[in-house]
Image (tube, rainbow, N blue to C red):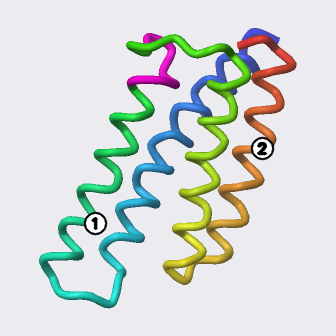
Amino acid sequence: MLILKNASLALAFLLELCAFAALGYWGFTRNTGWLVKIILGIGTPVIVAFIWGMFVAPKATYVLPEIYKELLALAIFAIAALALYAAGRSGWALWFAILVVVNRVLMVVWEQ
C-alpha cells in the first residue's frame, strides 16, 4: 500500500507540472503576434505557479483550510484542462481531467 501511496504523490506532482505545461502550450498556440504568444506562454504558467506556491503547495506561504485548498487546486487543474481543450487538444484535456480526478480522490481517501 505504501508503494501505491507514494506513486499517487508522484503522480500528483507530475500532474501539477502538466498543468503548468498545458497553460504554457495554450499561450503559445494563440492566434496572435509573437510577443503576445511569449507573454501568454510564459506568463500564464508563472502566475499560476506563483498562486499554487502561495496557497496550495504543501509548504504554502498562506495556509488555507483544506476544503479551500482542494477547491483552488481543482480550479487550477480545470483551467489547465480547459486550456488544452481551447488549444485543440481535446483528447489530452479529457485524459488529463480523468487523471486529476482519480488522483485527487485517492489523495483524499488516503489522507495525503
Circle count: 2
The residue closer to the viewer here, 49 or 107, is 49
User: What residue is rendered at 82% in x and 27% in y?
Assistant: 106
Residue 38 location, x and y as percent?
18, 69
Q: Amino acid at mark 2?
A: Val
Q: Earlier in the sequence, mark 2 or mark 1?
A: 1
How many residues crowd around disc 2 within 10 Å: few (fewer than 14), some, or many (20 or more)? some
Question: Does residue 42 appear left or right of residue 58 in this picture?
Answer: left
User: What residue is rendered at 65% in x and 77% in y?
Assistant: 90
The residue closer to the viewer here, 50 or 85, is 50
Q: CA distance from mark 2 to mark 1?
A: 26 Å
User: What residue is rendered at 32% in x and 45% in y?
Assistant: 47
**SS under mark 2:** helix
* Residues drawn in magenta: 54-59
Q: Amino acid at mark 1?
A: Leu
The quarter of the rendered structure image containing the C terminus is top right
How many residues crowd around disc 1 within 10 Å: few (fewer than 14), some, or many (20 or more)? many
The quarter of the rendered structure image containing the N terminus is top right
